[in-house]
Amino acid sequence: MAETSLRILLVEDEPAHAEAIRRAFLAAGPGAVIQVAGTLREYRELAAAAPPDIAIMDLKLPDGQAVEILTSPPEAGPFPILVMSSYGDEQVAVKAMKAGALDYVVKSSDAFAAMPRTVERALREWQLRQERKRAEEALRRAEENFRHSLDDSPLGVRIVTAEGETIYANRAILDIYGFRSLEELRTTPVEKRYTPESYAEFKKRYERRRRGEDSPSEYEVSIVRKNGEVRHLQVSRKELLWSGKKQYQTIYRDITERKQAEEELRASLREKEVLLREIHHRVKNNMQVISSLFNLQAGHTTNEECRGILKEGQMRIRSMSLVHEKLYQSRDLSKIDFAGYIQSLAVHLLHVYLVNPAQVRMETDFEDVSLDINSAVPCGLILNELVSNALKHAFPEGRTGVIKIGLRRGPGGAVELRVADDGVGLPKGLDFRKAESFGLQIVNLLVDQLEAAIDLDRTKGTAFTMTFRELKYAPRT
C-alpha cells in the first residue's frame, strides 16, 4: 500500500453500518485503508498496535461508550476521533465534543455516503488545531525570549492592559521616571506622571480607546520625573499578545535634547524671518526712493521723450517693488500670491495712465497661483509691459474697449498668463519677437529668462499668452 494511503480505524458493532461506510470510501477512491473494530477492547488493541490517521467511533458499543476513550488521553491517541450516534441528541453531541471528539455525525444512509467528505473536512480541522497548538507553544517560548530582550533594551518599554494597568516595565522606563520598582510606577497616580498638558491629551486618548475609536499609535508626551524634572518622550504604541491575551506595548524614547535643539532652531528661524521681512521692506523702500528720483528728474526736463522714458522706468521699478511689498506682507516668505500682485499692479497702471473707466475696462480671471521671487519679478515686468502697451496704444482717439488679464495653472503645474485686449491690434507685418520697441524687447528678454513660451493671437485685437514653469533656485557657488 502506498505511503499516502489514509489509515482509518472504524469502531462500529453494526456490520451493515460498517459496510455502508466502507463502500462509501471505496466509491470515493482507493486512497483509504479501513480497519474495523466492534468493541472498545478491539479499538484499544488496534490503536496501540498501529495508530490510525483518524478514528470513526460509535458512541455506544457492547462493552462501553466512546466517551470513555475520549476522556482518556493515552487511548484517545495523537489522532482525531469522529463520533457517530443513531440519535440526534444535542446533549450527547455536546458531551462528546467537550470530551475531545472532533465532530459528531448522526447515523443515516446520507451520512454514511458523505463520510469521505466528512473525514476530509475533519482532517483539515485537525491539522489546523495542531498548527494552532504548535503556534501557541512557539508564542509562549517567543514571549519568554521577548521579555528577556525587553529587560536589556535601552528604550523604555511598558506592557499595559486596555484599561491602562501596567503589567510589565523594563529597567529603562523605570530609570526614565526615576522609580525604583514596577510597584512604585503602578502606585504613582497618572496625573502626577505627566505635565498638565500631556495629562489632558492622555485622557483624550484613553476615552477614544474606551469608545472603540482610533487612537494615535505614535505621539509625544511630557512627563514629570520623581524628582520634578520634566522630560519629553516619543511614544509608539501597538497591540501584542502577552500571556495569551491582547495587551499593548508602549515604547518610550527620550527626546528631551532633541526638543530643546528644535526650540532653539525655531527661535533662530523666527529671528531670520523677521530679518528677511525687514530686508524685503527696505528693498521696497529703496526702490520707491529710486522711483521718486526718476519722478524728480522728469520734473526737471522739458523733453517729452525723456519724460516718457523716465515714467516707464518708474513703472518698471514699481512692478519690482511690488513683489517685495507682497513678500513682506505674505505669511510665506518664499512665495507671493501672484493673483493679488496682478490686481495691485493693474490698479496702479490705470492710475498712472489716467484711464477713464468709461472708456477702458479692466477684467480679470484668476486662479490661486503663488510664485517665488525668481519667477515673480520677471513675470511682473512682462505683465507691466504688456498692460502698459495696451493702455497706451490699443484704444486711440477715445475708442472704448476691454483689457482682460487671466492667470491659471495649466497641465503639469505650468503657469499660464494671458493679457488680451479688443483694441486696434498691432501693426500688420510687425513681428513682436524682432520689434524695435524697448518694451517688447524687454518682454522677449524676460521670456527667455523664464524659459517660457509666448504666443500672439491677432484674431480680435491683441492677445498674448505666456506659459512657463517656476524657475528653480540656483544655489550660489
Image: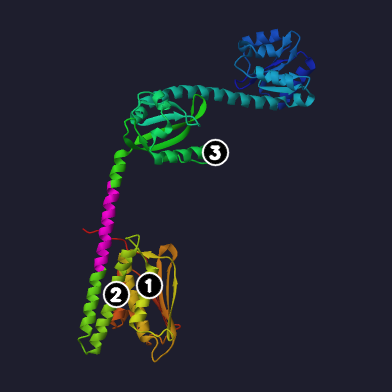
Q: Is residue 290 visible to us here?
A: yes
Question: Which of 76 and 192 lies nearest the eye of the viewer?
Answer: 192
Q: Which residue is mark 3?
A: 212
In primary-sequence order, the first of circles 1 and 2 is: 2
Q: Which residues are magenta?
A: 264-283
Answer with left or right where residue 388 lies relative to residue 249. Answer: left
Picture quadrant where residue 445 is located: bottom left
Residue tagged 2: 318
What x and y, as percent, mark residue 72? 63, 11
Establish if 48 lies above or below 278: above
| Of the pair 4 and 54, the residue shown nearer to us | 54
Residue 38 image point, x, y percent: 74, 11
- Mark 1 touches mark 2? (CB < 8 Å): no
Amino acid type for the residue under numbered disc 2:
Arg
Does residue 244 appear to the left or right of 318 in the view shown? right
Residue 179 locus on image (x, y percent)? 35, 26
Compute the Cα span from label 1 to label 2: 12 Å
The quadrant the N terminus occupies is top right
